[in-house]
Image (spheres, rainbow, N blue to C red):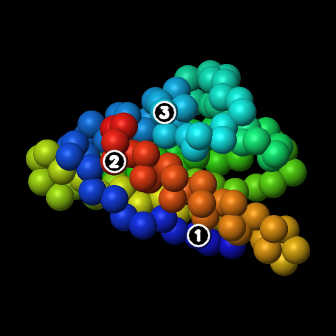
Amino acid sequence: MNLESQKVTLNKSATYTFNFLSDVKNFEKLMPENISKFEVLGEDKFLFALKGMPEIVLKKKEAIPHNKIVLGAAGGKLDFSLIADITEIDSNTSEVKLNFEGEFNAMMAMMIKGPISKFIETLTTNMVTTV
């Protein structure tokens, strides 16, 4: 299953945006209002839970300076990645698009498509006001 967020334009350089998203503790600032738990587990790993959903641990798997950050599921039963693609527009402006990629059976995909779509849209929307 592949889901994409809308592209958002940030009034920050690609370098600044990359550095912000590289620091996993900053994801707490981007989380939806219905977050019930957020905990940094290391410099490249964090745990979060939304109300009514199981806890999810994300770990930074890849970072290509100023262009891409890949967070992946760390343990658990679901294997997926959350990819931030960063594009430099000019020295003070960048665009970000989030991609969610995961392998799920048809039943699971149907159950999580809506909540995951809403989640990644919230992350990108919150980037505009937070980053």
Which structural element holds mark 3?
helix
Q: Position of residue 52 (x, y in %)?
A: 82, 45
For label 3, the residue is 29
Residue kind at label 2, given as amino acid type: Val
Q: Earlier in the sequence, mark 1 or mark 2?
A: 1
Q: On screen, 95 above or below 23?
A: below
**Which residue is located at x 55 percent, y 56 percent?**
120
Q: Position of residue 17 (x, y in %)?
A: 32, 41
For label 1, the residue is 3
Q: CA distance from mark 1 to mark 2?
A: 20 Å
Q: Position of residue 66 (x, y in %)?
A: 31, 46
From the viewer's perspective, tell me whether residue 85 is left or right of residue 103: left
**Which residue is located at x 68 percent, y 72 percent?**
1
Q: CA distance from mark 3 to mark 2?
A: 11 Å
For label 2, the residue is 128
Residue 44 visible within the image: yes
